[in-house]
Image (spheres, rainbow, N blue to C red):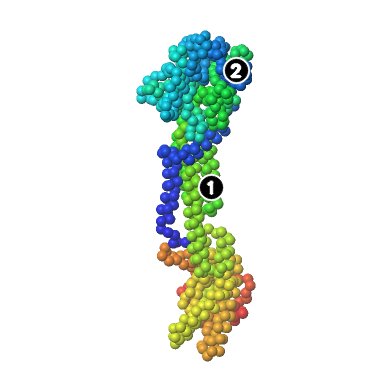
């Protein structure tokens, strides 16, 4: 138990540090695609859980849906598109954004009306920027608007599709091009596309700047993570056919920011978002516009230091698990890691709206590392400790006691502790005389056979073998496992020892050899029993006054014809034996006299 490899503390510290560094790496450095995918998967789940059904009253989505196309087949003449916009503006809409490109001229009257609306009305036309590198860059129509990018460029674009030249005087235009993530899900929208040194706003930003009113909104020119804070059902939607047929109530249009597009599969664009695998692009623009309006109103989530919170949570988990790994079972530590992971997922759910950049999966990666490395490592250490413990115990204790000790699941059973024990000390009377004239081999055999007579009863009666003392031994009962009848078991062992030694002595006498006699001292009382020693060598032993008294009783046996001398402490605790009083005697090293006893059976 004391001889674990010296580098164990260093390994533990290294595992803990590696777990913390994994979280730090995922938060501040370029994490691998698997971790990023885990981050986005978790964020998507959070968005789906958080999406509110609360109606959005500031935005109206006008959908050229399948029903509208059934009444008014596509393609529409520009006059119909102009009618749609004029009806909305006449109904009090604050502004209208069109999620439809008009690359080529159409009917002259309709084009003229659209040009007038785009030039003089609160109308935002669409133009599309391509953010992917193409062998042949897209280039169609005539770009409109844009401001010098300067020191704040947006997302670099490599091509474009714009409206025809007849709409070149449009006052407001917005980009409808997007950049889905690698898995095809749209989570970020470029607030500005940078092309030929100019920044072009996204459609929702252009509509906001044009028509939202209120204080200006400072926002970076880079990509915006769309929070998708509302469920799609929360947005007010109207069929384009109903608008054209003037079936909308005035309050459905008055004061609204209007987005016109199509959810029809035949003409509309469909995108995967955290809220659905096939979402009309028109609704993404609505979600971005909703975000801008919320920020303008001061209801945007306050920024939180999500990365630092992730690192703090990971550090707390590592500290907790580092404490429990060496003190609890592998199963408990696995459950603890699962609980810490669940707690982090809950905390990450709260952090997600407040920090676009932190990695929700980072602490989970660290927990997985602890599960895969730290738990098996400490389990292996526990197995090593168990093997060492068993090896140590089997030197001293009967197999049955070891088995019971394992079943008891005591924590560090060899740690010194104060227990009630009964100590038995036995040796051969006249050992020197017996062996001095014998050859070495015969002396060794005599000693071994005699110690066998002493050891078998001790182990058979579930005693703990402390040590051999050349021609004798020290044993005790009551440690490492407390035993209620420790005194009686020691007396049983003593009676068996006397019987075996007498049998061995009789055999020797029959062979013409000198007889043998065993002297035994037994005493019960408090003692400190445990594994004592240093990192170089240790022994499981018991120390205390009762142990010293047992040694003095064994020495006193030479003054009596009885083989077993018993102290008062054992007599008080024994329940199955009868005793013969031998009177009082002052034992060597003791100030007071002690009452001595022997077993009636050996009297």
Tell me: residue 223, above or below residue 15. Answer: above
Q: Nearer the viewer, residue 408 or 337?
A: 337
Mark before the other along the chain sequence, 1 or 2: 2
The part of the image, by quadrant, that contains residue 152 is top left
Question: Residue at (54%, 87%) from the top-left corner?
Answer: 508
Tell me: residue 224, above or below residue 497. Answer: above
Residue beneath disc 2: 73
Marks 1 and 2, Cα distance to the nearest angstrom? 62 Å
Q: Nearer the viewer, residue 452 or 72?
A: 72
Tell me: residue 417, above or below residue 152. Answer: below
Residue 136 in view (yes/no): yes
How crowded pointer 1 is (Cα within 10 Å; few <14, some 14-19, many 20+) is rated as some
Tag shown at residue 60: none
Q: Nearer the viewer, residue 392 or 60?
A: 60
Tag shown at residue 336: 1
Residue 82 in view (yes/no): no
- Can you give x and y, in whole percent of width and height, for residue 117 in the image? 50, 11
Work out which quarter of the rendered image holds the C terminus and state it: bottom right
């Amino acid at each position: 138990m004391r001889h674990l490899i010296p580098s164990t503390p260093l390994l533990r510290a290294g595992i803990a540090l590696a777990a913390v560094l994994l979280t730090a790496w995922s938060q501040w450095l370029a994490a691998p695609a698997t971790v990023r995918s885990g981050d986005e998967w978790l964020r998507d789940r959070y968005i789906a859980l958080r999406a509110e059904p609360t109606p959005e009253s500031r935005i109206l989505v006008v959908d050229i849906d399948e029903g509208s196309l059934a009444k008014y087949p596509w393609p529409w003449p520009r006059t119909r598109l102009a009618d749609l916009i004029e009806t909305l503006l006449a109904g009090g809409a604050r502004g209208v954004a069109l999620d439809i490109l008009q690359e080529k001229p159409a009917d002259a009257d309709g084009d003229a009306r659209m040009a007038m609306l785009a030039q003089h009305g609160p109308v935002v036309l669409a133009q599309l920027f391509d953010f992917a590198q193409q062998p042949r860059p897209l280039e169609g129509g005539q770009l409109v608007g844009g401001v010098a990018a300067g020191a704040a460029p947006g997302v670099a674009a490599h091509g474009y599709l714009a409206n025809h030249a007849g709409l070149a005087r449009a006052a407001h235009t917005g980009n409808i091009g997007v950049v889905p993530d690698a898995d095809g899900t749209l989570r970020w929208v470029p607030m500005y596309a940078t092309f030929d040194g100019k920044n072009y706003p996204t459609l929702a930003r252009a509509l906001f700047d044009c028509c939202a009113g209120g204080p200006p909104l400072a926002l970076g020119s880079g990509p915006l993570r769309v929070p998708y804070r509302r469920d799609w059902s929360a947005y007010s939607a109207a069929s384009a056919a109903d608008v054209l047929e003037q079936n909308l109530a005035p309050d459905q249009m008055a004061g609204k920011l209007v987005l016109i597009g199509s959810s029809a599969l035949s003409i509309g664009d469909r995108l995967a978002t955290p809220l659905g695998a096939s979402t009309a692009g028109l609704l993404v623009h609505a979600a971005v516009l909703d975000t801008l309006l919320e920020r303008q109103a001061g209801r945007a989530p306050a920024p939180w230091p999500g990365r630092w919170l992730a690192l703090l949570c990971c550090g707390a988990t590592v500290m907790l698990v580092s404490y429990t790994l060496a003190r609890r079972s592998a199963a408990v530590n696995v459950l603890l890691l699962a609980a810490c992971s669940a707690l982090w997922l809950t905390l990450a759910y709260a952090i997600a709206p407040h920090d676009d950049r932190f990695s929700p999966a980072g602490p989970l990666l660290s927990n997985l590392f602890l599960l895969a490395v730290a738990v098996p490592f400490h389990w292996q250490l526990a197995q090593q400790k168990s093997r060492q413990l068993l090896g140590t115990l089997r030197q001293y204790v009967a197999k049955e006691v070891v088995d019971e000790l394992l079943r008891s699941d005591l924590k560090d059973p060899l740690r010194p502790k104060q227990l009630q024990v009964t100590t038995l000390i036995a040796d051969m009377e006249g050992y020197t005389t017996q062996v001095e004239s014998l050859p070495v081999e015969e002396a060794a055999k005599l000693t071994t056979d005699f110690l066998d007579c002493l050891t078998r009863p001790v182990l058979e009666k579930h005693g703990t073998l402390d040590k051999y003392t050349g021609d004798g031994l020290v044993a005790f009962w009551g440690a490492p496992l407390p035993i209620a009848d420790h005194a009686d078991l020691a007396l049983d062992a003593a009676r068996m020892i006397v019987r075996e030694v007498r049998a061995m002595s009789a055999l020797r006498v029959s062979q013409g050899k000198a007889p043998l006699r065993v002297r035994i001292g037994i005493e019960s009382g408090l003692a400190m029993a445990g594994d004592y020693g240093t990192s170089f060598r240790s022994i499981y032993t018991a120390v205390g006054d009762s142990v010293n008294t047992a040694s003095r009783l064994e020495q006193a046996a030479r003054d009596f014809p009885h083989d077993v001398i018993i102290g008062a402490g054992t007599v008080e605790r024994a329940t199955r034996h009868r005793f013969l009083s031998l009177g009082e005697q002052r034992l060597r090293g003791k100030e007071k006299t002690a009452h001595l006893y022997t077993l009636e059976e050996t009297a």
